[in-house]
Image (spheres, rainbow, N blue to C red):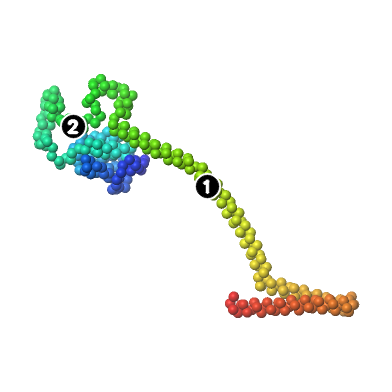
């Protein structure tokens, strides 16, 4: 879940820099033509615990702690839960600073800093003394309209007491009010755009499904053909091996030796039949000459082959 939250940070924001993996990240925003950086610190308890966002340089904004620069009062931080998206929280802060560029803390303003501090202390003292009416009147007159607007990003000061009570009591009315807030509408618009892109990708994938299926069938056919060719090659290879053994010089030599021995034995048989009186002279001569001729021819081939094999062995073949 921690990784998914970090992924949302990279999805909804540009220029995300990883300072320490899974612990610290940096995001840059444009603030009135000047660049600001938001440092995101993820504690050991994140995402069960809210992240810490620190802006640099420190800004004068109701969401920002003027001393530490920590963004404490942003809606996404105040309402953070384990189901919140870190990327959307940071994006909403950056949008706020881009749309309403605040001043930097080290910049001078129309009201001197020591005077503002004294005025604030005086107001707090009056409040403690029970002069609540005077304090409220002075504070309303001292706070400029722009600062009031920045301190009330939800527009609650424009609501009547009855509307505020209704917000507190009616959850449907509260949900409808939140849905109409500008930054919520902006996030919903971005979500709609993102969903539109996702639907477009889904349709594109579905359109490619038929092509993928065709290619898959073609691949299966080629795989089957390859298997059949492989089996045919194995069969032919075995057949070749047998032929190679049958026609090897050594095997031919053995066959010739058998053939010579057979022809010699056949000529001896003809001589034995003649000597035993089982064959006349004419038949004996004809058969004996043929068998001896065959024997002589085969013997000559055998001797010639033996000479050739011996020569090859000497030549180291």
Which residue is painted at 62% across and 62% down in the image? 237
Query: Secondary structure under badge 2?
Result: helix
Which residue is painted at 75% across and 77% down in the image? 297
In the displayed structure image, the side of residue 172 where residue 156 appears, left or right:
left
Q: Position of residue 209 (x, y in %)?
A: 49, 42
Location of the C terminus (image quadrant)? bottom right
Rendered position, 224 above or below 317: above
Question: What residue is disc 1 on?
Answer: 215
Q: Quadrant of residue 265?
A: bottom right
Question: What residue is disc 2 on?
Answer: 146
Instruction: Report the Cα–Cα distance between label 2 and label 1.
Output: 64 Å
Q: Is residue 308 visible?
A: yes
Which residue is painted at 22% across and 25% down in the image? 158
In the displayed structure image, the side of residue 176 where residue 124 appears, left or right:
left
In the displayed structure image, the side of residue 191 where residue 68 appears, left or right:
left
In the displayed structure image, the side of residue 189 where residue 33 appears, left or right:
left
Location of the N terminus (image quadrant)? top left
Q: Which mark is residue 247?
A: none
Q: Is residue 67 visible?
A: no
Q: Quadrant of residue 13?
A: top left
User: Which residue occupies the extreme top position in the image?
Assistant: 162
CB under 8 Å between discs 2 and 1: no
**Residues packed near mark 1 inside 10 Å, few (<14), some (14 to 19) or many (20 plus):** few
Q: Which is more N-terminal, label 1 or label 2?
A: 2
**Residues packed near mark 2 inside 10 Å, few (<14), some (14 to 19) or many (20 plus):** few
Q: Position of residue 65 (x, y in %)?
A: 20, 37
Query: Secondary structure under badge 1?
Result: helix
Rendered position, 305 above or below 241: below
Asked whether 67 or 193 is in front, the reply is 193
Q: Position of residue 44 (x, y in %)?
A: 30, 42
Asked whether 7 or 182 is in front, the reply is 182
Q: Position of residue 162 (x, y in %)?
A: 25, 20
């Amino acid at each position: 879940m921690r990784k998914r939250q970090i992924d949302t940070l990279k999805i909804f924001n540009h220029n995300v820099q990883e300072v320490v993996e899974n612990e610290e990240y940096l995001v840059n925003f444009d603030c009135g033509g000047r660049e600001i950086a938001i440092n995101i610190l993820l504690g050991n308890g994140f995402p069960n615990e809210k992240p810490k966002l620190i802006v640099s340089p420190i800004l004068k904004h109701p969401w920002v702690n003027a001393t530490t620069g920590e963004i404490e009062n942003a809606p996404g931080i105040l309402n953070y839960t384990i189901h919140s998206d870190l990327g959307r929280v940071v994006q909403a802060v950056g949008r706020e600073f881009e749309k309403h560029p605040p001043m930097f803390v080290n910049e001078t303003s129309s009201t001197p800093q020591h005077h503002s501090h004294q005025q604030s202390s005086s107001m707090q003292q009056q409040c403690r003394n029970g002069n609540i009416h005077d304090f409220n009147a002075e504070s309303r007159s001292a706070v400029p309209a722009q600062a009031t607007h920045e301190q009330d990003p939800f527009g609650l000061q424009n609501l009547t007491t009855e509307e505020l009570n209704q917000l507190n009591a009616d959850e449907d009315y509260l949900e409808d009010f939140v849905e109409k807030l500008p930054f919520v509408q902006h996030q919903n618009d971005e979500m709609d755009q993102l969903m539109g892109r996702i639907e477009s990708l889904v349709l594109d994938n579905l359109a490619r499904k038929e092509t993928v299926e065709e290619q898959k069938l073609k691949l299966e056919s080629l795989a089957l053909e390859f298997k059949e060719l492989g089996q045919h090659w194995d069969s032919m290879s075995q057949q070749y091996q047998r032929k190679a053994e049958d026609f090897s010089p050594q095997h031919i030599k053995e066959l010739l030796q058998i053939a010579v021995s057979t022809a010699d034995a056949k000529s001896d048989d003809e001589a034995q039949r003649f000597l035993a009186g089982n064959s006349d002279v004419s038949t004996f001569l004809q058969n004996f000459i043929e068998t001896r001729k065959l024997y002589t021819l085969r013997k000559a081939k055998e001797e010639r082959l033996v000479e050739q094999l011996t020569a090859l062995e000497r030549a180291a073949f």
